[in-house]
Image (spheres, grey):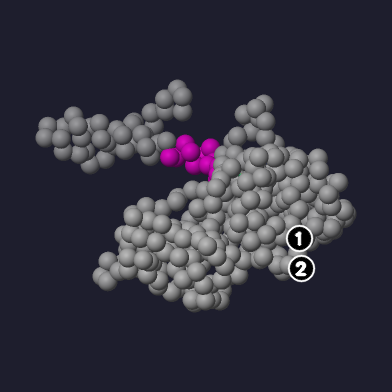
Amino acid sequence: MTARMSGPFRFGDRVQLTGPKARLHTITLREDGELHTHHGVLRHGDLVGLPDGSVVANSSGHEYLALRPLLRDFVMSMPRGAAIVYPKDAAQILAQADVFAGATVVEAGVGSGALSLWLLRAIGPAGRLVSFERREDFAAVARANVETFVGELPANWDVVVGDLAEDLPHAVAPASVDRVVLDMLAPWECIDAVAEALTPGGVVVCYVATATQLSRVAEYIRSTGLFTDPDANETMVRGWHVEGLAVRPDHRMVAHTGFLIWARRLAPGAVPPEVKRRASKTSFSDEDVELWTPGAVGDRQITDKNLRKRVREAERAAEGARQAAELPGGEPADEAPEEAASRPSSESA
Ligand SMILES: C[S@@+](CC[C@H](N)C(=O)[O-])C[C@H]1O[C@@H](n2cnc3c(N)ncnc32)[C@H](O)[C@@H]1O
């Protein structure tokens, strides 16, 4: 039975109970179910028929606030095989990938199934989600988590145990997928298969943890010539404490989870109008050390003439400081002598 997200409680619903001392218990309502704590016994049946957000008392009169867990509550507390996509990033993925009701979506890897749950909700019953996972044990965790939250294994969700790059061409027809989300260590290894599967105009979003992965997947996407130029961002969410006059940011936050990078599939043979950009080297290998110049990494380069001027300025200032230190009482000299300014710079300059 599919879990209901609103309405009065019924058997089969998951309910979060916040009891004495703010202790949290999550239960699934069963006909003969009881919650036993050292504060007494609460019969599950006492909740059935009550509106979400009700307060119920147990056998000793201890009160519990009963609420259905939201998806964000569930993913943060569900069993994990692999690290999950946090709700703040899942929300951005849905927006940047433009996941819509009825969409055909591919994701890899499925990990613990957190992102699968957000994607399933966004595509709705008319959509289709195909999730790839290399590890059978992780896929089992994901299936169990989705079944727990949804109440059943959704009919529009397929989990393929295998490598996306190898198995995607066998699982979907070419140009049939609307959106692809990659959450894995080496998404660039899958971009060719993704390009084949995506419909023209379709979106690929990659979620990566490090700047080196971000750079590598960006350059790979560009090198194919099959996508629009990729965009990237990261999302930092800072909570606020809002109570009386104490209104301030929280002292702690989750500062880094990952980066998102996304691009759209071009139509076959399409070459987008050239965008004028500052020359930048795009190759990426150990032999490329000499390519890591200020120009290549996007820094403005100083002209030789300008640099000589800056050297003279710096040396004049240093000479002034030196003279000031030598004067009785440490008084600064009015001006650096001309010869100091014309002194040749050090050998390394
Ligand atoms: C960080 S986890 C994904 C977490 C998941 N998105 C979630 O929210 O719970 C990354 C997963 O990708 C899987 N993986 C890595 N490369 C893969 C590939 N080429 N094909 C399929 N799965 C892959 C790993 O086994 C791992 O379980």
Position of residue 195 measured from the top left corner of the image (x, y, whole percent)? 80, 50
Note whether ligand 1 is within 8 Å of mark 1.
no
Position of residue 167 measured from the top left corner of the image (x, y, whole percent)? 81, 43
- What residue is at 63 percent from the left and 51 percent from the top? 144
The N terminus lies in quadrant: bottom right
Residue identifier under label 2: 126
- What residue is at 59 percent from the left and 42 percent from the top? 81
- What residue is at 31 percent from the left and 34 percent from the top? 318
Helix, strand or loop under label 1: loop
Judged from this view, the residue extending furthest toward the top is 347
Asked if the stretch drawn in magenta spans residue 92, the answer is no
Mark 2 crowd level (few <14, some 14–19, many ≥20, 10 Å Cα) = few
Tell me, yes or no, whether the two marked residues, 2 and 1, touch with CB atoms within 8 Å.
yes
**Left or right for 235, reference 335:** right
Position of residue 95 measured from the top left corner of the image (x, y, whole percent)? 63, 63
Magenta-drawn segment: 299-310
Cα distance between the residues tagged 2 and 1: 8 Å
Residue identifier under label 1: 156
Q: Which is nearer the eye, 124 or 50?
A: 50
Helix, strand or loop under label 2: loop
Judged from this view, the residue extending furthest toward the left is 329
